[in-house]
């Protein structure tokens, strides 16, 4: 589903672990690292999409997390033209995202990257809260900064 402005609705997940560190994952067969994120289906709420993506991408169920909060609205980023599928209609120029901050309350052993036939990630690590801003692909950097700034006050370090 693409909105009238060309943005695909999406959720982003910042998973807060112990000592203020956050979950950061390496894209499958790629050198890029990012937070878990994914599209919102037309038949689900933003929060339902977040829990579905949480399970599909990193194997966590609602019992493994505490929802600390979300961004108050959509945060948008544009895809570079080389990543826009020009033949697709309607044209998707980027993503609009609601970001969620979750506190992980499980053991690392429950984290799993292979809950679908096509995993998003093949590695992960706990990193300092602001570390992802330095490592995420350039076109997502602004959204990461805004999401972390908005959600940092809710973090329970």
Image: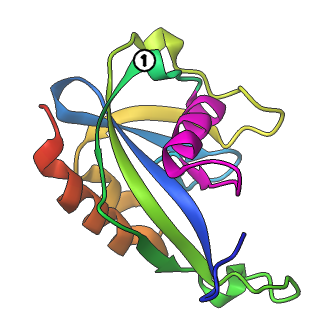
In reply to whether residue 48 is colored magenta, the answer given is yes
Q: Residue at x 51, y 12 (%)?
A: 110
Against 92, residue 57 (above or below) is above
Q: Where is residue 6? Give x, y as percent.
A: 64, 85
Q: Is residue 138 visible?
A: no
17 or 29: which is nearer to us? 17
In reply to whether residue 86 is colored magenta, the answer given is no
Q: Is residue 8 left or right of residue 12?
A: right
Against 36, residue 9 (above or below) is below
- Please give the residue where the numbered disc 1 appears in the rendered image: 64
Instruction: Assess disc 1: are there few (<14), some (14-19) or many (≥20) residues with their C-alpha within 10 Å of its C-alpha.
Output: some
Q: Quadrant of residue 98?
A: bottom left
Q: Quadrant of residue 134?
A: bottom left
Q: Where is residue 155? Give x, y as percent.
A: 17, 39
Q: Quadrant of residue 123?
A: top right
Q: Where is residue 4? Give x, y as percent.
A: 64, 87
Q: Residue at x 13, y 32 (%)?
A: 156
Q: Which contiguous range is marked in magenta?
A: 37-58
């Amino acid at each position: 589903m693409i909105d009238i402005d060309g943005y695909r609705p999406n959720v982003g997940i910042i998973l807060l672990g112990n000592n203020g560190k956050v979950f950061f994952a390496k894209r499958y067969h790629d050198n890029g690292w990012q937070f878990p994120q994914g599209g919102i289906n037309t038949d689900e709420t933003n929060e339902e999409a977040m829990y579905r993506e949480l399970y599909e991408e990193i194997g966590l169920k609602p019992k493994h997390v505490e929802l600390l909060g979300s961004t108050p609205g959509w945060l948008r980023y544009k895809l570079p033209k080389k990543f826009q599928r020009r033949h697709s209609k309607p044209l998707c120029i980027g993503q609009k995202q609601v970001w969620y901050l979750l506190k992980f309350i499980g053991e690392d052993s429950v984290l799993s990257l292979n809950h679908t036939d096509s995993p998003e990630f093949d590695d992960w690590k706990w990193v300092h809260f602001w570390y992802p801003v330095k490592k995420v692909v350039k076109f997502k950097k602004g959204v990461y900064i805004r999401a972390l700034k908005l959600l940092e006050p809710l973090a329970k370090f």
